[in-house]
Image (tube, rainbow, N blue to C red):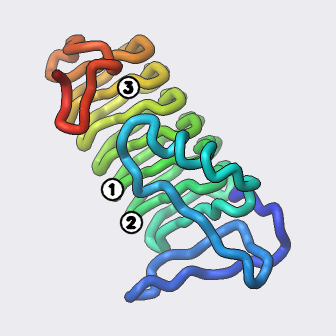
Amino acid sequence: MLRRDLPVRHHLRDRQGLFRLTPGRAPGRPLISVCPVDHQGARRRIVRALGLPPHRYPAIVHRTAVIDPGCTVGHGTVLMPMVCVLPGVTIGDHVIVRPHTMMAADVVVRDYGTVAAQVFLGRRAVVEENAYVGAGAKVRGYASVGSGSVIGMGSPVLGHVPRGETWAGNPLRRLAPASRLTDRGPT
């Protein structure tokens, strides 16, 4: 179920009328979205600096996204085209889920996480807070990606990825601590 703090539900129209917006908002109050910011930790810093209440950050869901009614989607989250979310999934606040992503039953994506395009998250997989899962990655059921970790494009995650590390490749291997990341990738 999508969080609704206010009874009114408004719609956001882009050029093609493709996005729906929730929760509702009071008339005349501006809405804030910081989800397009992908740099690790930047969304959290922006939200904290703004200091606004959660209902000022709407969840934005593309109309082609398929979300089971038994799911929870947090404030400020953006679900892009063709995202499929199965029963029991919990998506935290200020999460980005890019196009053509599949989340099996009971997946958890914690606050400020980013799931890139064409990712598969298996049953009960967990993407911890502020983690990034690269395009085309596959996270096996019951596996987890630690807080602040980065998973490279197309990488298979079969177990637990420790907190704050960068892992990539097939087979998956540790490349660097996430703290060594810059805007241009690992240093």
Residue 27 or residue 95, whichever sits in front: 27
Q: Indicate left or right for 96 with 99 as reference.
A: right
- Mark drawn on residue 140: 3
Q: CA distance from mark 3 to mark 1?
A: 17 Å
- Mark drawn on residue 81: 2
- Mark drawn on residue 41: none
Q: Does residue 175 lie above or below 28 as drawn?
A: above
Mark 1: which amino acid? His
Q: Position of residue 171 (x, y in %)?
A: 16, 16
Mark 3: which amino acid? Arg
Residue at which label 1 appears: 100
Q: Quadrant of residue 100?
A: bottom left
Q: Quadrant of the C terminus?
A: top left
Q: Quadrant of the N terminus?
A: bottom right
Q: CA distance from mark 3 to mark 2?
A: 23 Å
Q: Does residue 167 lie above or below 65 as drawn?
A: above
The residue located at (61%, 81%) in the rendering is 11
Residue count near mark 1 (Cα–Cα under 10 Å), binned few <14, some 14–19, many ≥20: some
Cβ–Cβ below 8 Å for labels 2 and 1? yes
The reply to whether residue 154 is in sight is: no
Q: CA distance from mark 2 to mark 1?
A: 7 Å
Mark 2: which amino acid? Pro
The reply to whether residue 136 is in sight is: yes
Q: Indicate left or right for 20 with 104 as reference.
A: right
Q: Quadrant of residue 138?
A: top left
Q: Position of residue 149 (x, y in %)?
A: 38, 23
The residue located at (56%, 58%) in the rendering is 67
